[in-house]
Amino acid sequence: MKIAIIGASGRLGGTIAREALARGHEVVAIGRDRAALAALEGARPVPADLDDADSVVNAVAGSDVIVSAVTDRTTADRSRIPATAALLLELAPRAGVRRVAFVGGGGSLYIAPGLRALDAPAFPERFRAEALAQAEALRILRDAGDHVEWTYLSPPPHYLLPGEKTGHYLVRAGDDAVVNADGESAITEGDFAAVLVDELEQNRYPRRRFTAAS
């Protein structure tokens, strides 16, 4: 496939790009850090600015799927994240792209009946703004029509860990966190990237949120 990754210069976006490249996919790498993009051997760096809609359309045109791995450290409310969800729903059809995959957050997953992780007293305050922004991005995707086939991958609520791909994890659709027999929920960045690329290839969760943990 031809996969356009917005945020490919970030740590997680870059890990996803390398996983896709290792599987033989064509990767269009879009991001702010040109040095990081250049380090993605085999990817095609393409300049684009999320504040310039035409540049995004030109960058992703002809792709089979757009992956958003956008983060936001520039605004207190992390508003870039939901704005990107809305933007891609608008721009994907203009670019002739049917599918959008969103690298989401885990804070809005339920860790007990009626209790989201981000609403629990122990949820770290420093992550709350991003968790709320990611929850809003998910709402925007869910409220979209059928003109774009989106999917949203949540990591575990707390533990997305540096590390290589192990191949040992459980994937499940829905809003509940995946936990093991000890009540733990974690995944390495390598495994998380593999889960996302699996979904790009298999398209098992169209218009749904899904999550994974080991």
Image (tube, rainbow, N blue to C red):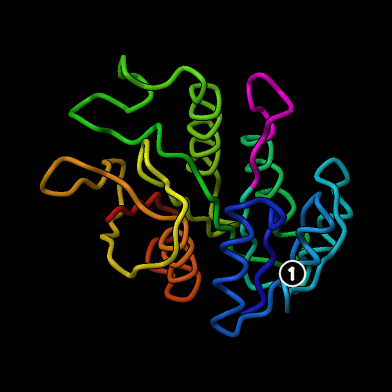
Q: Is residue 157 left or right of residue 115?
A: right
Q: Residue 201: x percent and y percent?
A: 48, 76
Within the magenta stretch, is there residue 77?
yes
Is residue 3 depicted above or below 112 in this figure? Answer: below
Classify the position of the C terminus by image quarter.
Answer: bottom left
Q: Which residue is mark 1?
A: 28
Q: Is residue 98 left or right of residue 62?
A: left
Q: Which residues are magenta?
A: 70-80
Quadrant housing residue 204: bottom left
Is residue 114 depicted above or below 177 in this figure? Answer: above
Q: Residue furthest bottom?
A: 24
Query: Residue type at mark 1?
Result: Val
Is residue 148 depicted above or below 77 in this figure? Answer: below
> What residue do we see at 42% from left, 48% from top?
161
Q: Residue furthest top?
A: 121
Q: Residue 208: x percent and y percent?
A: 40, 52
